[in-house]
């Protein structure tokens, strides 16, 4: 079947197309070259005046796994509202939507892929099970390392980098992940030993290793194995006033190896002013602009009820007293990781929340390079992903942004430079952040662009002055060439695939790992590993292996 | 499956611990548990499975006829109830697809116990841990209400005593304290080195006041009474002192054993005590229990509908009510009841209405309107189960051939027939 998307205004930053009026052809799920004049076109969509982009990619969104399911279970009130009149299967929720609702809501906004950023390796099977039940979109995840006892033992024993690289590669295979994440490096483990804080150069009481060492070893492993996505870092001291210093130091901790600093808004706080809480956005943006090896996503907060779900047990324990409603779940997990789920309500009249909102937007607007900063709310931690259209409007519409700013807590307004920033994001820049840049960052070689040969994940919008309305309801969304959404409503249910990387490694390390599991764990190594058959799910799912290009010799 | 070849060990679905080190020997179609098994594992793996046939009103029929009869009953039903729900992840996924079409009430056979815990989580949250953390870190374990081994025969041996230490030279020489009835045989908790458990005698009916006092003491409050339910207050204070001095204490219970009204409030006292202890040292709760796929059913239902269990499906919406949607309350209000029990031949409670049984082949002699035998997961059918600590899920294997279909396949066929109406 040959489909022609005719005459749309195409924003495809990977090809430098900034609103180029052109036709796009789709066959068998892929974008193809202009066919011969005598080939029959089965279906034509007249897209004159419409905006065409690749399907959007959310590179950091908590969509599946233990803590997401805890968040669902913790908040039955979130699921009682009947929000899904046209959903063909029971399943709802807004802050922590069901797997099915997650796929629907993403597709309805023109997103065709989302990545779970915190797969606890021991919980990888559950993450994948939930993502397999998430329709339409492609998915994948980053495996959490850095507080697991196997890695910390290696680091404390000063094992060589090759051994660490082999373990990192093994974890990627075992968890069917596409990247490596570190959360509060070493801190989740330190909390189990009753440490309540851990700064970048502080020692873990038991292992006598520092977060800096964890970051260096893991970022080097990721780089040397050729994993496209840089080490995904949730730094130390999340949410702590003054943590901007930790974040700036963290940028240097990898000694030049690429790092992705996630939800950087939560790590950009100064401790100035009467309330000892201030914006560190300008310093963070300047450092980002000057550090080509660093990328970041923002983790914007938006005002309303949400639920925070994180692997950072240490910081979530500290935040549990702020829970609203007043309940939280914290877990130590299997000498592997941890998690904390704390419901939260951000209020625009609250000084701290209002300033958090401003700090996020300041970072977006002060960072020069949209290829290195990404649009996230750290769903659901800053806000549910369904608020992305609102966030895009804040970035694209200065007068709207300033109207919102003028309603904030007055003390917070006086501490922010936001309304003096004139920048408005263009459609091209939005396409970089949410498509081309995100695909490049995650290592999705055939997604996020509309070149010949790419997967036909395509979103078509009607341009409107109100960008929130525009991005909330695309005219058409195609997933692998199938029309899945028309006028903002799902018309076809497909199931998407799971993106992974499979770097080469020395298989003989399994001998040591098998012994480790047998001696210290309560499950065997073989059962820890998630098999490709499990992801295939009797044919409904499947693995896409994205390429790695090893860099064992050189350094960034 | 590659996992099997690597480890040559099976995962036992008989209780929530999901021990995955069970070695069996296969001889003449009969399985023998060779090593690591407990009584529950033996009775699961060594069961002789009768050959069974689909039946309508007790008479043998083809699978297609039974499927048609089941779908007819569901199609003509005004309100159906799916209960038992002894199944694994795949079975539950298939079941949810079906009830989304048919509409139904949904409840698991263990949910009375399960919801005692879930209600605490939903009201207040909690701080918990998992089995490997317990093995490696717990230096004080307070067991409340029972001695665990009735439900989890290998709890002490496999989780506490077997294996090597990650931190330090040896696994912690643990203090085990049992707060439970006088008739408990706590010698089961004596360690291989001869260290005996301490027994603080407390009948389960008195746990609410004892645990509330323990919580108060953990918060640093003073109790003026000299005794709480015949236990000297000083004994409770000493217990709190031990918990406070511990590096990593674990407070554990079996919700099933706390079988008295509003036991959830009692469990909440335990979890709040953990919270209080964590202000200074580390402590975690460990809710134990589980069988018949209950944890898997709660997990799958939660990611599919947002709710753990006890639901009503109506016109594509799921509702949740841990009180009103109990199978016990609803079984006489619903006109068709579907009882599912795949791991064990557990019969449904007697009921007036029409009953469809889908499950273990040995259920074939139960009186019902339609019976469809299916493969036993973990014995005849591979799949996935969640362990009691929820973070860990494990593959279960098929080690015995079966002519039958899996539950998910039968449910798929019923759904197809239902659509054809």
Image (spheres, coloured by chain):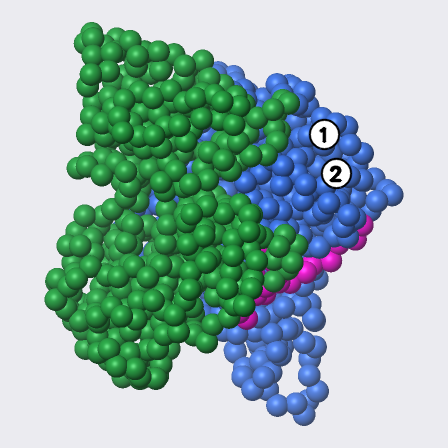
Chain colours: A blue, B green
Residue occupying image coordinates x 67% and y 92%: A38
Residue placed under numbered mark 1 in the picture:
A155
In the image, residue B64 lies at what x, y percent?
A: 35, 83
In the image, residue B388 lies at what x, y percent?
A: 42, 43
Image vertical order of residue A408 relative to residue B20, above or below: above
Residue occupying image coordinates x 34% and y 30%: B185
In the image, residue B57 lies at what x, y percent?
A: 21, 78
Task: Please say if the residues under marks 1 and 2 sit with CB atoms less than 8 Å apart.
Answer: yes
Tags 1 and 2 both on a single chain: yes
- Quarter placement of the N terminus of chain A: bottom right
Nearest to the observer: residue A539 or residue B109: B109
Residue placed under numbered mark 2 in the picture:
A164
Residue A547 on the magenta span:
yes
Residue B93 on the magenta span:
no
In this orientation, does residue A469 appear?
A: no
Query: Which chain hosts label 1?
Result: A
Nearest to the observer: residue A3 or residue B107: B107
Left or right: A102 with respect to A168? left
In this orientation, does residue B177 appear?
A: yes
Residues drawn in magenta: A530-550
Compute the Cα span from label 1 to label 2.
8 Å
The crowding category of the residue bearing disc 2, from other C-alpha atoms within 10 Å (few below 14, some 14 to 19, many at least 20), is many
Mark 1 or mark 2: whose residue is earlier in sequence: 1
Secondary-structure class at tag 1: helix
């Amino acid at each position: 079947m040959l489909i022609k998307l005719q005459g749309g205004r195409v924003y495809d930053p990977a090809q430098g197309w900034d609103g180029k009026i052109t036709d796009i052809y789709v066959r068998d799920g892929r974008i193809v070259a202009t066919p011969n004049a005598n080939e029959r076109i089965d279906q034509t969509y007249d897209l004159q005046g419409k905006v065409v982009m690749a399907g959007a990619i959310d590179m950091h969104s908590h969509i599946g796994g233990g803590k997401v399911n805890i968040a669902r279970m913790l908040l039955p009130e979130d699921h009682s509202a009947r929000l899904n009149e046209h959903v063909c299967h029971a399943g709802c929720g807004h802050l922590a939507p069901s797997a099915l609702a997650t796929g629907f809501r993403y597709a309805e906004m023109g997103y065709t892929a989302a990545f779970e950023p915190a797969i606890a390796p021991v919980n990888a099977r559950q993450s994948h099970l939930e993502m397999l039940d998430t329709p339409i979109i492609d998915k994948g995840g980053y495996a959490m390392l850095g507080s697991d006892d196997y890695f910390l033992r290696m680091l404390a024993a000063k094992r060589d980098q090759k051994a660490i690289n082999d373990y990192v590669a093994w974890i990627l295979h075992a968890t069917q992940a596409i990247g490596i994440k570190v959360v509060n490096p070493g801190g989740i483990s330190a909390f189990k030993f009753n440490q309540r804080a851990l700064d970048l150069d502080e020692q873990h009481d038991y292992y006598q290793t520092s977060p800096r060492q964890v970051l260096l070893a893991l970022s080097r492993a990721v780089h040397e194995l050729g994993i496209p996505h840089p080490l995904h870092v949730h730094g130390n001291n999340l949410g702590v006033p003054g943590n901007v210093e930790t974040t700036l130091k963290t940028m240097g901790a990898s000694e030049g190896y690429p790092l992705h600093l996630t939800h950087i808004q939560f790590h950009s706080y100064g401790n100035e002013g009467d309330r000892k809480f201030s914006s560190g956005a300008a310093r963070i943006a300047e450092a980002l602009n000057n550090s080509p090896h660093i990328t970041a996503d923002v983790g914007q907060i938006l005002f309303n009820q949400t639920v925070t779900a994180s692997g950072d047990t240490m910081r979530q324990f500290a935040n549990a007293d702020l829970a609203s409603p007043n309940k939280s779940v914290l877990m130590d997990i299997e000498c592997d990781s941890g998690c904390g789920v704390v419901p939260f309500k951000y209020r625009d009249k609250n000084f701290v929340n209002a300033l958090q909102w401003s700090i996020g937007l300041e970072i977006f607007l002060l960072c020069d390079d949209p290829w290195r900063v990404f649009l996230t709310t750290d769903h659901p931690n800053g806000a549910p992903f369904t608020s992305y259209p609102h966030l895009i409007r804040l970035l694209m519409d200065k007068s709207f942004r300033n109207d919102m700013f003028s309603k904030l807590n007055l003390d917070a307004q006086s501490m922010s430079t936001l309304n003096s920033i004139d920048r408005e994001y263009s459609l091209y820049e939005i396409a970089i952040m949410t498509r081309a840049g995100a695909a490049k960052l995650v290592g999705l070689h055939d997604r996020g662009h509309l070149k010949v040969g790419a997967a036909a994940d395509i979103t078509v919008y009607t341009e409107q002055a109100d960008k929130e309305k525009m991005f909330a309801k695309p005219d058409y969304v195609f997933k692998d060439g199938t029309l899945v959404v028309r006028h903002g409503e799902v018309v076809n249910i497909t199931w998407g695939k799971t993106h992974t990387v499979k770097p080469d490694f020395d298989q003989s390390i399994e001998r040591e790992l098998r012994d480790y599991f047998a001696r210290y764990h309560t499950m065997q190594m073989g059962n820890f590993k998630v098999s490709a058959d499990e992801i295939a799910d009797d044919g409904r799912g499947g693995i896409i292996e994205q390429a790695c290009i090893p860099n064992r010799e050189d350094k960034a | 499956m590659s996992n099997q070849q690597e480890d040559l060990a099976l995962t036992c679905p008989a209780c929530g611990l999901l021990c995955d080190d069970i070695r069996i020997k296969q001889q003449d179609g009969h399985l023998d548990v060779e090593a690591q098994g407990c009584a529950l594992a033996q009775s699961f793996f060594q069961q002789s499975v009768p050959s069974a046939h689909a039946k309508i009103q007790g008479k043998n029929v083809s699978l297609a006829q039974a499927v048609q009869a089941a779908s007819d009953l569901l199609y003509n039903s005004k309100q159906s109830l799916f209960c038992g729900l002894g199944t694994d992840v795949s079975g539950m996924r298939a079941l949810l697809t079906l009830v989304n079409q048919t509409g139904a009430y949904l409840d698991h056979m263990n949910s009375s116990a399960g919801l005692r815990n879930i209600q605490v989580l939903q009201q207040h949250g909690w701080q918990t841990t998992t089995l490997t953390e317990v093995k490696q870190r717990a230096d004080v374990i307070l067991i409340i209400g029972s001695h665990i081994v009735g439900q989890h025969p290998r709890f002490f041996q496999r989780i506490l005593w077997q294996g090597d230490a990650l931190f330090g030279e040896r696994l912690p020489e643990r203090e085990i304290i049992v707060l439970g009835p006088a008739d408990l045989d706590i010698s089961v908790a004596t360690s291989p080195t001869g260290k005996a458990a301490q027994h603080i005698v407390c009948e389960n009916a008195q746990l609410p006041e004892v645990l509330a006092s323990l919580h108060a003491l953990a918060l640093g409050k003073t109790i003026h009474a000299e005794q709480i339910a015949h236990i000297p207050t000083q004994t409770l204070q000493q217990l709190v002192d031990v918990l406070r001095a511990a590096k990593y204490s674990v407070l554990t219970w079996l919700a099933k054993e706390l079988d008295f009204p509003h036991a959830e409030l009692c469990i909440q006292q335990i979890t709040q005590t953990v919270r209080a202890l964590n202000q200074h040292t580390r402590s975690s709760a460990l809710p134990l229990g589980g069988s018949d796929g209950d944890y898997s059913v709660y997990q799958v239902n939660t990611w599919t509908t947002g709710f753990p269990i006890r639901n009503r499906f109506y016109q594509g919406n799921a509702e949740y009510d841990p009180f009103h949607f109990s199978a016990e309350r609803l079984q006489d209000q619903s006109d068709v009841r579907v009882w599912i029990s795949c791991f064990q031949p557990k019969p449904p409670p007697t009921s007036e209405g029409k009953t469809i049984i889908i499950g273990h082949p040995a259920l074939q002699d139960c009186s019902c309107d339609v019976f469809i035998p299916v493969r036993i997961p973990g014995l005849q059918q591979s799949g996935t189960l969640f362990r009691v600590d929820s973070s860990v899920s494990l593959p279960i294997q098929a080690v015995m051939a079966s002519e039958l279909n899996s539950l998910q396949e039968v449910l798929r066929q019923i759904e197809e027939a239902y659509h054809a109406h």
